Amino acid sequence: MRPKVIAGNWKMHHGPAATRRFFSKFFGEFSPRLSGAEPTILIFPPAISLLAAAESKGGRPEISLGIQNIHWEPKGAFTGEHSVGMALAAGARFALVGHSERRHVFGETDAQVESKVAAAMREGLTPVVCVGETLDERRDSRVQEVIVRQLDAALLGVPEDVKNSILVAYEPVWAIGTGETATVDDVADAHGILRRRLREVRGDAFAQEVAILYGGSVKPANAAELLAVADVDGVLVGGASLDPESFARIVESG
Ligand code: PGA
């Protein structure tokens, strides 16, 4: 069985000092299990706080860090962007790619998602590819079409010979930061669609390796129920990951 993945996306919150405070409180709140499968914890701070996060987490093997966005070029005149190499040097091992805020606020395209996945994989960061439909797309019964299109574009960036390679996060846009959570049935449907598509495009062995996370208003009160849904291998948490106590409670649900 895949260990559960509990990921926190801090978005544009917690600079370096707040990051240090988060970790010292989080370690007080959360005690690693003595037995049984430990969830994998991923934290995505703002890029400017990665070094502080890496220093604060020290050698704790159960926690890995990620960057919220990368550029596909290794260097150059791209004001405000970060390369994969820079993210690695600052302590990141994972990268969010195609988060709905990147797609819908900053106009990121499927082609850019493909380039970012390819760059991450080439240089050694594991991409966490986010997919999800808007409310209008759901009302128009286009959930499958949209998330399969977004997944297919991302998979184009994954070299053919790669096995354990990416994570996928299903995050319905209308459930992000709104307090609206998708129903257990909606989540099961979407995750089933994604797992089937992974199998169709890359075969069974590949599909079984990929952890599919759910994201969108996950909080301590609903995490256990969501984590129990078929094909849900973890959660990607925004707002509720900012507070060390609430994030620790979600980790304990994993
Ligand atoms: P939310 O954000 O938990 O605040 O809804 C989730 C995300 O955007 O990853």
Image (tube, rainbow, N blue to C red):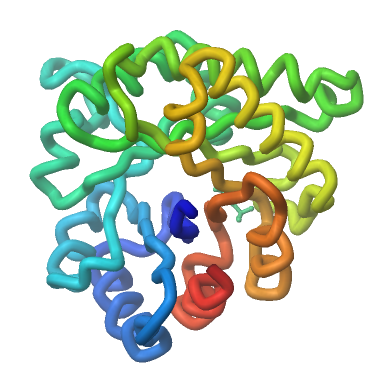
Q: Where does residue 163 sit, x and y in percent of width and height?
A: 32, 28
**200 or 94, nearer to the observer:** 200
Q: Nearer the viewer, residue 123 or 25?
A: 123
Numbered circles on residues, count: 0
Residue at image coords 22%, 48%: 92
Q: Quadrant of residue 167?
A: top left
Residue 56 visible at all: yes
Left or right of 216? Residue 211 is left
For this rendering, which residue is in front, 155 or 119? 155
Q: Residue at x 59, y 26 (%)?
A: 104
Image coords of residue 210 (percent x, y): 46, 37
User: Vertical placement of 71 versus 34: above or below?
Assistant: above
Residue 57, percent from left and from top: 21, 71
> Does 50 sit left or right of 160 as displayed?
left
Question: Viewed as shown, does residue 110 lie left or right of 74?
Answer: right
Is residue 33 depicted above or below 104 in this figure? Answer: below
Q: Position of residue 142 (x, y in %)?
A: 81, 18
Residue 5 relative to residue 224: left or right? left
Q: Is residue 76 above or below residue 235?
A: above
At a point 30% along the width and 37% down the height, the residue shown is 126
| Residue 7 seen by the camera | no
Q: Residue furthest bottom?
A: 28
**Residue occupying the point 43% across, 76% down:** 36
- Foreground residue among 90 and 121: 121
